[in-house]
Amino acid sequence: MESLAPGALHARFLRGLEKSPRGVAVRVGGETVDYTTAHAAALSWAGALLAAPGGPPKAVGILTGRSPIAYVAILASLYAGLPAVPVPADFPAGKIVSMLGAAEVSALVVDEEGAALLAGSTGAELGDLPVLAPHLDGAGTRALADGTALRPLTAAPDTALAAPRSAAPQDVAYVLFTSGSTGRPKGVRLTHGNMAHYFALMDDWYDFTEADVFSQAANLNWDSAVSDLWCAWAAGAPLVSVPPHAYRDLPGFVAQHGITVWFSAPSVISLSRRTGRLEPGRMPSLRWTFFGGEALQFEDTDAWQRAAPDSAVINVYGPTEMTITTHRHRWHPEESTRLGVNGVVPLGLLHDGHGELLLDERGEPAADEGELWLSGPQLSAGYLDPQDGLGKYLEQDGVRWYRTGDRVRRLAGGELVYLGRMDSQVQVQGYRVELAEVEHALRAASPVGGAVVVGVPVANSTELVAFYLGERRSPQEFLRDLSPVLPAQLIPRHYHRLDEFPLNTNKKTDRLALTALAAERHGARVPVPVA
């Protein structure tokens, strides 16, 4: 058996195993799995995958709910030297089939939710695919649900690996599908080399130990979950899955489990504020907090900091295509609000070893403001379908770049601030409108608990529609508040109060759903991309 290269992602688990052999590796509800048990199971499952009829699979689909099996299945895939493709079992069946096909998945690991899904039409659509439905209690493999036509794999002592297989830097570790917030989900190939650079920085910057307790708020197909998982496992610390009901009293959940490291989308803050539970001092155990995936608002950040007074609060930025994060900014109330724009915390400074370009609307380099392009060792191997990368992965002067589509401003000290998506600009009566600017004005000038603005086509033009939280207000009241701070073209025509914003599966505000709702209410029909 070849020796495991230190740059292989799963070498991080072996570090944790050495530190905490009997410590909890993952907790999901009342179930826990320790490091030694997870290691033995992963070796057994990896051997079963490699012994699949027809030879080792090209990639392993992890079709599960939130269960310990999901986490150990990722480890098993990497132990086998195969790419892991996590796909939540609660996704629409057609979407699951499409994602697994695009990733060339040729074997599955399933838990009870995944097995139940395969018993229906999804199983027939996937064809004759080997499936491992393992136990974690040493009992080997469970029977698949009746009705599935897929081939069961058996985990047995005679096929278990003696040690994990190694991986080269260019080998794919994960295939993650983008959320679909701007269109059809695209599979991104992240290599062991990409991961090695990111996690080396995390190890240098943060003092994680086996005494920490990590949250895992996002689904396993989301890049923040990759960060949670492998930071926790390298430290020998437990990872605690956050169930949906925890958000009714998130500070209580954090306190109950003694969570010290939190990572989620910022929408979680406003969700917690609306429950009335995000009170000062309620999360004393937190040491590190990371927010990413959406614009982080001043007001929300301040509320979280007061609730977790001993925690550093870090705003992180980075598209999935650049392997989790590329920028970071630590919240300081005075400095962050001085530097931020539109009430949004700065993105921060670029990670070591990377390059960034700002390009204006003509594609020319810009000194201070423009679309952000990124390059460096965390730049992914690209999309599964090369056609998806046209216009996104580009080469310039011998350097390969990723075009983010985000408009940013560079400050004097080199930090970036987020101005909005290039594709979030809309034209209203010939006037270019940045939706983030309108949202900030609504939050600052009106007594609302939150605001999202979308543009919908109406009579050969575009009208702005605002959704807000808080007390019901009339359009005239909004007009009175906004007229002193916004040009007339930027003031929304329509306002709709909501009890809460719709969230996608990763607790990010679902702008597609709000755009569709705005179009429905105002008689306009806009094409909504199929996620």
Image (spheres, helix red, strand yellow):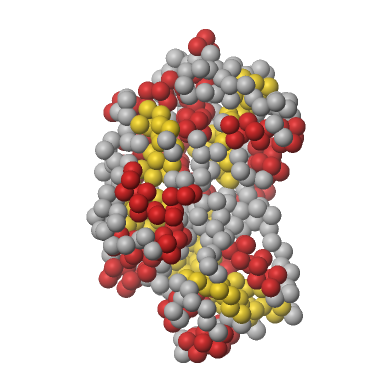
Number of numbered discs: 0
Of residues 415 and 88, which is closer to you in this image? 88
> Which image quadrant: the N terminus?
top left
* Residue 129, horizontal then vertical, whole percent: 68, 26
Give the vertical position of 438 relative to 366 (above or below).
below
**Residue 205 horizontal side relative to residue 199, left or right:** left
The residue depicted at 50 percent of the width and 90 percent of the height is 480
Q: Quadrant of residue 141?
A: top right
Of residues 32 and 192, which is closer to you in this image? 32
Q: Quadrant of residue 132?
A: top right
Give the vertical position of 447 relative to 57 (above or below).
below
The residue depicted at 26 percent of the width and 43 percent of the height is 207
The residue depicted at 59 percent of the width and 57 percent of the height is 181
* Residue 401, horizontal then vertical, whole percent: 52, 52
* Residue 171, horizontal then vertical, whole percent: 52, 32
Of residues 486 and 116, which is closer to you in this image? 116
Residue 60 in view? no
Residue 335 in view? yes
**Residue 513 horizontal side relative to residue 468, left or right:** right
Q: Residue furthest top?
A: 158
* Residue 432, horizontal then vertical, whole percent: 58, 79
The residue depicted at 32 percent of the width and 29 percent of the height is 23
Of residues 158 and 498, which is closer to you in this image? 498
Give the vertical position of 205 relative to 140 (above or below).
below
